[in-house]
């Protein structure tokens, strides 16, 4: 099955699609932003591997030390995203992509692989049940809900950074921490800014634009994190509709 996949590289990034935003015109503005982000990450060992087809089938991972998430540990790979959708489900693609990542970790002499998940399946997070089949175990947890899963080859385990355990901010305003790894984010930000401006809703948009900031956000974070009334709400991306529905704004 390996011949059906390809990795995004510096040489092919301008001609290859990025899967998740392949057919959605309103998110095309974010594709260029994501490609620029990838150009800076690929030399660090960041991997974006996808099915060589017009579909949402890919895995994205990086060395934990350079992964833009508040997780710490020695010599692990961190999976940002593993996504297989639509008619591509049930064909073994998710297994093939995960196995590639695991084998890559072993070939590099890594201590293991880790990923953000949750007890109950949540949007934008990897399915815990699927990962458990491959030997992943809970290495750390927050609020008895979000979990850091790890497949350790040598007994070592990663953990959330101490800043994550705050899960709160001092401001009562709608507060969103965001990165630019996901091509959906620019459009989501635009919708939120417009809606909040039109309705007089105070909003704080905090760019997580360095590795140091990403390692020290005050909550669970995987490109996006939302607070309201000082309390952490979700890592799920929000547009105008989901903002009104989830937070009652």
Image (spheres, rainbow, N blue to C red):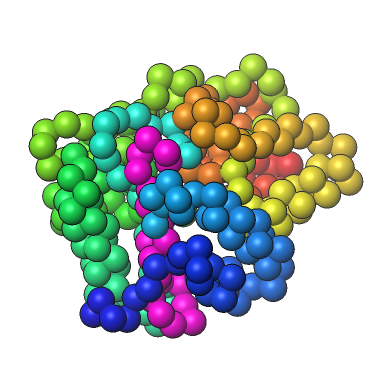
Left/right placement of residue 206 relative to residue 41 reads right
Compare residues 47 and 143 and report the one nearer the observer: 47
Label tally: 0
Compare residues 199 and 138 and report the one nearer the observer: 138
Residue placed furthest toward the top: 170
Q: Is residue 64 magenta?
A: yes
What is the quadrant of the N terminus in the image? bottom left
Residue 108 appears at what percent x and percent y?
Answer: 22, 49
Q: Is residue 221 above or below residue 45?
A: above
Residue displayed at 83% across by 49% down: 194
Residue displayed at 81% across by 42% down: 196
First to last magenta residue range? 48-67
Q: Is residue 165 above or below residue 15?
A: above
Q: Is residue 37 above or below residue 68?
A: below
Left/right placement of residue 193 relative to residue 216 reads right
The answer to whether one can see residue 65 in this image is: yes
Residue displayed at 29% across by 73% down: 93
Location of residue 141 by image quarter: top left
Residue 5 appears at what percent x and percent y?
Answer: 34, 75
Compare residues 153 and 9 and report the one nearer the observer: 9
Residue 202 appears at what percent x and percent y?
Answer: 80, 32
The answer to whether one can see residue 233 in this image is: no
Residue placed furthest toward the left: 154
Location of residue 71 by image quarter: top left
Left/right placement of residue 7 relative to residue 170 reads left
Residue displayed at 69% across by 54% down: 186
Residue 88 appears at what percent x and percent y?
Answer: 37, 79
Q: Is residue 115 magenta?
A: no
What is the quadrant of the C terminus in the image? top right
Left/right placement of residue 62 relative to residue 178 reads left
């Amino acid at each position: 099955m390996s011949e059906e996949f390809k990795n995004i590289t510096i040489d092919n990034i301008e001609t290859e699609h990025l899967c998740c935003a392949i057919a959605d015109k309103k998110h095309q503005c974010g594709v260029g932003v994501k490609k620029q982000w990838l150009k800076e990450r690929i030399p660090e060992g960041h991997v974006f591997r996808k099915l060589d087809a017009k579909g949402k089938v890919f895995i994205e991972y990086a060395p934990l030390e350079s992964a833009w998430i508040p997780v710490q540990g020695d010599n692990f790979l961190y999976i940002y995203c593993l996504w297989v959708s639509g008619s591509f489900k049930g064909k073994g693609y998710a297994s093939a992509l995960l196995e590639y990542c695991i084998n890559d970790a072993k070939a590099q002499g890594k201590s293991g692989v880790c990923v953000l998940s949750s007890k109950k399946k949540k949007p934008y997070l990897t399915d815990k049940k699927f990962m458990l089949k491959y030997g992943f175990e809970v290495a750390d947890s927050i609020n008895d809900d979000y979990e850091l899963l790890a497949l350790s080859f040598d007994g070592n385990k990663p953990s959330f950074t101490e800043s994550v355990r705050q899960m709160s901010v001092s401001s009562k305003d709608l507060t969103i921490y965001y990165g630019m790894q996901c091509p959906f984010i620019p459009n989501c930000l635009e919708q939120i800014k417009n809606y909040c401006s039109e309705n007089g809703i105070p909003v704080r948009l905090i760019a997580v634009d360095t590795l140091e900031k990403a390692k020290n956000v005050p909550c669970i974070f995987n490109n996006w994190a939302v607070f309201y009334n000082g309390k952490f709400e979700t890592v799920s991306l929000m547009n105008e509709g989901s903002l009104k529905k989830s937070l009652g704004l």
